[in-house]
Amino acid sequence: MTSPLFTHSPYQVTSTEQGYAFTTDLGERYLIYFSDASGYFDGLDFAPHALMMGLARRSGGDPLQHDPRILATLMQSLEASLQDVKRVLVYVCDQSDGKQEYRHKLFGLWFQRHNAGRFVRHVVAAANGLYASVIYSKNNPFTSELEDSLPELTNKINQ
């Protein structure tokens, strides 16, 4: 079933048990997945609102082709997820093919160009093959507590 959250997405996105799936024009299949990230924020008030988010290539097509519509589809998912201003996303770049640093840089460029001040992003891992960011609405009522927790989160993720 096509998700109503993605009515303006460059690709048709369908809702699955694991998250949101789409297929590119070149036949690449992707999954935008979510999982519980509350364990990274034990005991904090915003922990129940924390999700891990990622994009995984499932199969098909030529993975060497650059397709900006993939990133646009991912970003629409991120924006839809952050409609709940209490939501905290921990976005981790896919490591399956060794291109996580490239994805991290591309994501950062998008964020700078298209954020328009609506969201806050903190990079919590950018070395040793692991690239992760914490993203939340600038209107998140837990902003102070969240920002205070970032050093500990950075330590947990980089262990």
Image (spheres, rainbow, N blue to C red):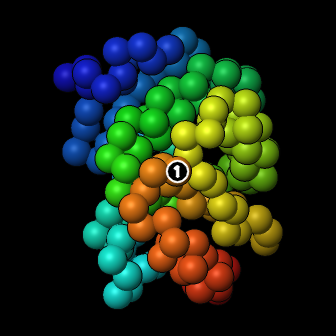
Q: Is residue 78 visible?
A: yes
User: Which quadrant of the figure has residue 31?
Assistant: top left
- The local crowd at label 1, few if under 14, some if 14 to 19, many if 20 or more residues have their Cα within 10 Å, is some
Q: Residue at x 49, y 65 (%)?
A: 143
Residue 144 image position (x, y, % from top left): 51, 72
When asked about the image quadrant of residue 153, the answer is bottom right
Image coords of residue 78 (percent x, y): 47, 40
Place of residue 49 in the rendered image (x, y in percent of width and height, measured from the top left): 32, 63
Quarter of the picture holding the C terminus: bottom right
Task: Please name the residue shown 54% across and 80% down the image.
Answer: 149
- Total residue callouts: 1
| In the image: residue 102, left or right of residue 94 | right
Is 9 above or below relative to 134?
A: above
**Vertical relation: 24 (above or below) 78:** above
The vertical placement of 156 against 81, above or below, is: below
Residue 30 appears in view: no
- Residue at image mark 1: 138
Q: Which residue: 58% across, 15% down? A: 26
Q: Is residue 2 above or below residue 49?
A: above
Q: Amino acid at mark 1?
A: Lys
Horizontal and vertical percent position of residue 121: 63, 54
Indicate the quadrant where residue 13 lies: top left
Q: Residue at 52%, 51% (x, y): give it.
A: 138
Task: Name the image quarter holding the N terminus.
Answer: top left
Secondary structure of residue under mark 1 = loop
Q: Is residue 149 left or right of residue 104?
A: left
